[in-house]
Image: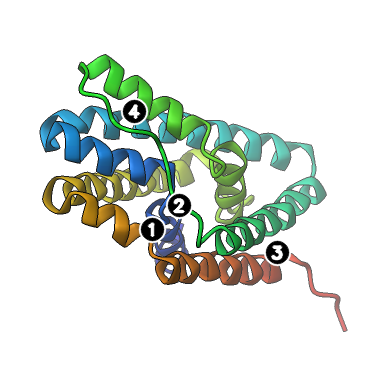
Amino acid sequence: MGWDAWTVFAVFWVLFVTTPGPNAVNCIQNGMALGFARSLWGVAGILTQATAFLLLSAAGVTALIAASPVAFLGAKILGAGLLIWLGVRGWVRASRPLAAGQAAVSGPAQIYGRALAIATINPKSVAGYLAAFSQFVDPTVPIGAQMGVIMPTALTLTALSYCGYTALGVGLGRAALSAIANTVIRRVLAGCFILYGLALGATAVPRSGG
């Protein structure tokens, strides 16, 4: 993965993991109720989910590449469509309240398990990871070499994002929930998803010769 491709991927992943949703709300609520150090078990749960879904996405993309270039192209186009759908969905729901339930004061296993469960059922999960991942894989380069760049980048940005949300919960309390629930902020991020999906879809569609 060259520098330009890595930059596009990194910018996209920042958008992907900072868009407010159940994970962000859970991290803020953990920070409010448990403090920063104990809340890191929740971030660990999110990173476990992210690692598993990145590996599953890599396996799925590898299978598509092996099966057919046409199948891989179809996955890229469908993936771009899903990103647009996530953006439209986020825009429509921007005025609705975010909710992940109240964080209970509990032990590390409960904090970790709760965060893992919330991350796993997140609408951006399996399909979202596959959609995002498929856009940045070069079928002419071994997947292992690309994963050596993609995995550390994605997991580092994911960790920074949710540690940041946890710190917001510790420092700002309920004001942090109000900030990420802001309709304008959520619609700007949703619009970015739509634009990214359109741009990536445009690059995926083959251009006819002549």
**Kind of residue at badge 3:** Ala
Disc 4 residue crowd, few under 14, some 14–19, many 20+, Cα 10 Å: many
**Kind of residue at badge 4:** Gly
Residue 204 horizontal side relative to residue 190, left or right:
right
**Quick one: SS at disc 3?**
helix
Horizontal and vertical percent for residue 206?
A: 78, 68
> In front of the other: label 1 or label 4?
1
**Kind of residue at badge 1:** Ala
Q: CA distance from mark 3 to mark 1?
A: 33 Å
In the picture, the disc for residue 97 is 2
Instruction: Kindly check if marks 4 and 3 are in contact, taking CB atoms under 8 A apart as contact.
Output: no
Q: Is residue 33 above or below residue 206?
A: above
Q: CA distance from mark 2 to mark 1?
A: 7 Å
Residue 114 horizontal side relative to residue 160, left or right:
right
Q: Nearer the viewer, residue 76 or 26?
A: 26
Residue appearing at x 35%, y 49% in the figure: 153
> In front of the other: label 3 or label 1?
1
Disc 1 designates what residue? Answer: 181
- Say whether disc 2 or disc 1 marks the residue closer to the N-terminus: 2
Residue appearing at x 35%, y 44% in the figure: 25
Residue appearing at x 40%, y 68% in the figure: 185
Instruction: Kindly check if marks 1 and 4 are in contact, taking CB atoms under 8 A apart as contact.
Output: no
**Quick one: SS at disc 2?**
loop
**Quick one: SS at disc 1?**
loop
In the picture, the disc for residue 90 is none
Disc 1 residue crowd, few under 14, some 14–19, many 20+, Cα 10 Å: many
Instruction: Kindly check if marks 2 and 1 are in contact, taking CB atoms under 8 A apart as contact.
Output: yes
Image quadrant of residue 103?
top left
Disc 4 designates what residue? Answer: 45
Q: CA distance from mark 2 to mark 4?
A: 24 Å
